[in-house]
Amino acid sequence: MRKNPKSRCTKKAVSKAVGVCRLYSALQEKCLDHLQADEQVKSIRCNVPLDGQDFTSDFMCQKSDGSYLVRECVERKHIAKPRNLSLLDISRDYWIRHGVNNWGIVTDKEVHDA
């Protein structure tokens, strides 16, 4: 996601995040709720900037075992767009270079099925 998106913003406070989370889609809201309810997730950071990039990752979480996970939220109808594919590749590569191997994409299908 761009660092300064020009879309609706919902602010939500959850106990596992410091401060207020800024969410730019219903999919992000549902993903945040899922992460908040996950007993293995110890802390949540929203819209984490990628050094040297003009965009952020949706969620970076620390798990109770000390490892990290990163989740990017993309609606299925938008996932195959070249720009989104490029951003997802950049995010995945960035986090792997920083030692985070638990990287994944959350789509509206997974959220509705959960």
Image (cartoon, rainbow, N blue to C red):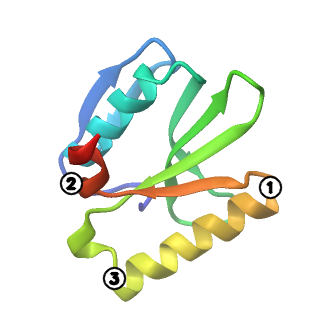
- Amino acid type, label 2: Ser
Residue occupying the point 37% across, 31% down: 34
Q: Are marks 3 and 1 in contact (CB under 8 Å)?
A: no
Secondary element under disc 3, as helix, strand or loop, is: loop
Q: Is residue 13 left or right of residue 46?
A: left
Residue occupying the point 78% across, 28% down: 66
Which image quarter: residue 82? bottom left
Q: Nearer the viewer, mark 3 or mark 2?
A: 3
Sort mark 2 into few (<14), some (14-19) or many (20+) by Cα contacts within 10 Å. few
Q: Is residue 102 left or right of residue 71?
A: right
Answer with mark 3 or mark 2, whichever residue precedes in sequence: 2
Secondary element under disc 1, as helix, strand or loop, is: loop
Residue 80, which numbered label? Answer: 3
Residue 7, which numbered label? Answer: 2
Residue occupying the point 60% across, 73% down: 90
Q: Looking at the picture, does residue 79 appear above or below residue 99?
A: below
